[in-house]
Image (cartoon, grey):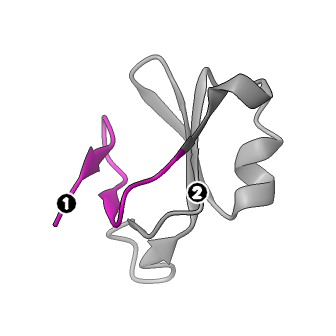
C-alpha cells in the first residue's frame, strides 16, 4: 500500500456499520487506500511531510471532505 497523502488525528465517518468512525485515512491520487488508525495510515508509505491533520470531521469517500 502506498499513499501520497495521509490524514491523521481526525474523526472520519466511514459509512461502515462495523467501524463507523476512524481516526486516519490514506489517499493515493484520488484513490482511498486505507481507513483506520493513525499507525496504519503512517505505515502507508507516505513520508512525514505527507501527514495532514484532519479537520473536526471528515467523510471517507472518493476524496476527503470536511463536514461540519
Residue 24: where, in percent of width, then height? 58, 57
- The structure residue drawn at horizontal position 37% and vertical position 53%, both measured from the top left corner, is 60
* Left or right of residue 50: residue 48: right
Residue 56 in the magenta stretch? The answer is yes
Could you say where residue 39 lies in the image, as x and y percent from the top left?
80, 57
Task: Give the crowd class for mark 2: few <14, some 14-19, many >=20 residues within 10 Å.
Answer: many
As for residue 11 lying within the magenta part, the answer is no
Magenta stretch: give its range.
53-68
Q: Tell me which secondary structure the magenta stretch mostly adopts.
A: loop
Residue 66 pos. (x, y %):
25, 52
Mark 2 = which residue?
24
Tell me: residue 10, above or below residue 6: below
Q: CA distance from mark 2 to mark 1?
A: 15 Å
User: Is residue 2 visible to us here?
Assistant: no
Foreground residue, 47 or 18?
47
Q: Secondary structure at mark 2?
A: strand
Q: Which mark is residue 67?
A: 1
Q: Residue furthest left?
A: 68
Q: Is residue 37 above or below residue 40?
A: below
* Residue depicted at 39% across the width and 82% down the height: 17
Residue 32's disc number: none
The quarter of the displayed image where residue 5 is located: top right
Residue 57: name its quadrant.
Answer: bottom left
Left or right of 1: which side holds 6?
left
Amino acid at each position: 500500500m502506498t499513499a501520497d497523502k495521509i490524514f491523521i488525528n481526525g474523526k472520519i465517518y466511514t459509512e461502515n456499520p462495523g467501524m463507523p468512525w476512524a481516526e486516519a485515512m490514506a489517499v493515493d491520487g484520488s484513490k482511498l487506500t486505507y481507513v483506520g488508525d493513525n499507525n496504519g495510515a503512517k505505515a502507508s508509505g507516505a513520508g512525514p511531510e505527507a501527514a495532514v491533520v484532519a479537520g473536526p470531521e471528515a467523510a471517507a469517500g472518493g476524496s476527503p471532505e470536511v463536514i461540519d
